[in-house]
Image: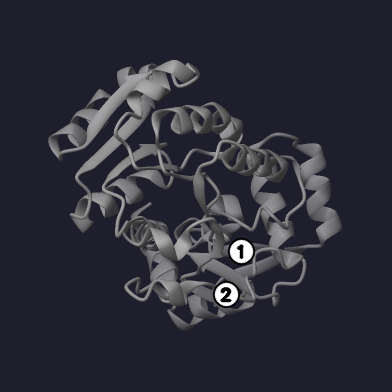
Amino acid sequence: MTSFKSIAVFGATGDLGPFLVNALLESKSFSTIRVLTRSESFKEKPETFNDLKARGVQVAALDLSNEDAVVEALQGIDAVVSSISGSVITNQLVWVKAAARAGVKRFIPSEFGINSQKAIGPVFEKKRSVQEEIVKNGLEYTLLFVSLFADETLIPLFGFDIKKGTARLVGDSSVPLTLTYRKDIASFIVEILKNPSVSRNKALQVKSLQTSFDEIIERFKALGTPLKVSRLTVAEAQEVIDANPGTVESFYTMLFIKAAQGYMYFDTVDNGLFPNVKPSGLDVAVQEAIETAKQG
């Protein structure tokens, strides 16, 4: 097969999903783009889904926990891309079984972070359980690891409060760091779907850029927005997590610890498989953060 032609997307209105749907539409390479969403989500966001319909996207609103209903919604689909959040990652177990029953060829699960085959922690164990279910059901797969979203790193939740002119770093901020823009991730996925053989049953690491938090601080200074830096040790950051279990703050602090420990750096990447993807550089994220702060 030279290209998958009919694509289904779970999580189309989440953090990554809109970038993915836009890229699929703009590529003009797919005969069918179908979004599967919860019936409740459709009722909550009718304008969003009606806009997708107007752009030529098929929208199926259903009970996503009902395997038979998902089987029906996946009829005629070549490949599934899931871009749901980590909090509901095991919902994919039902979708994998449904995809196999519906005759789907490939399932691209929701990874799009650090390498779950190497990382330790509950969310990564859940991701590995989905990977195992894909293999068990005889589906092809592609695992795409991207480290951190470049365009969601320089934000207050990650310690960068550009409006206040401050940055809070954790541990060794000279540790190398891999970042990938969501628009670039979507482009990589489109290339995977257009050229299935290149990525069949592979775990791939891709990037937009390699940097460090020290370099990021220097880029803000070079672009006329110096930041006052405060620092936490890894032990102090862990205390923040322990004091705020299950919160957004603790989640982002955990990511900062992982970065300080080197988990957010890919020493090898597979960008060479996708020469048509031209990633953006660091200054795009820095300038965007500066402009957002001015507008806010």
Q: Are marks 1 and 2 in contact (CB under 8 Å)?
A: yes
Identify residue for label 1.
167
What residue type is disc 2 on?
Answer: Ile
The image quarter containing residue 195 is bottom left
Please tell me which residue is depicted at 55% across the width and 73% down the height of the picture.
269
Can residue 290 be seen from the camera position used here? yes
Identify residue for label 2.
217
Secondary structure found at label 2: helix
Q: Most extreme residue toward the bottom, as rendered?
A: 222
Q: Classify residue 249 as left or right of residue 148.
A: right
Q: For the residue carrying disc 1, how many other residues have a C-alpha within 10 Å: few (<14), some (14-19), or many (20+)? A: many
Q: Most extreme residue toward the right, as rendered?
A: 235
Q: For the residue carrying disc 2, how many other residues have a C-alpha within 10 Å: few (<14), some (14-19), or many (20+)? A: many
What residue type is disc 1 on?
Answer: Ala
**Closer to the camera, 147 or 97?**
97
Please tell me which residue is depicted at 34% across the width and 55% down the height of the picture.
295
**Closer to the camera, 66 or 132?**
132
Residue 113 location in percent, x, y?
A: 57, 54
Q: Classify residue 257 as left or right of residue 228.
A: right
* Quadrant containing the N terminus in the rendered view: bottom left
Question: In the rendered view, would you say 203 is above or below 279?
Answer: above
The image quarter containing residue 172 is bottom right
Q: Which mark is residue 191?
A: none
| Marked residue nearer the N-terminal end (1 or 2) | 1
**Closer to the camera, 189 or 232?**
189
Please tell me which residue is depicted at 32% across the width and 21% down the height of the picture.
61
Secondary structure found at label 1: strand
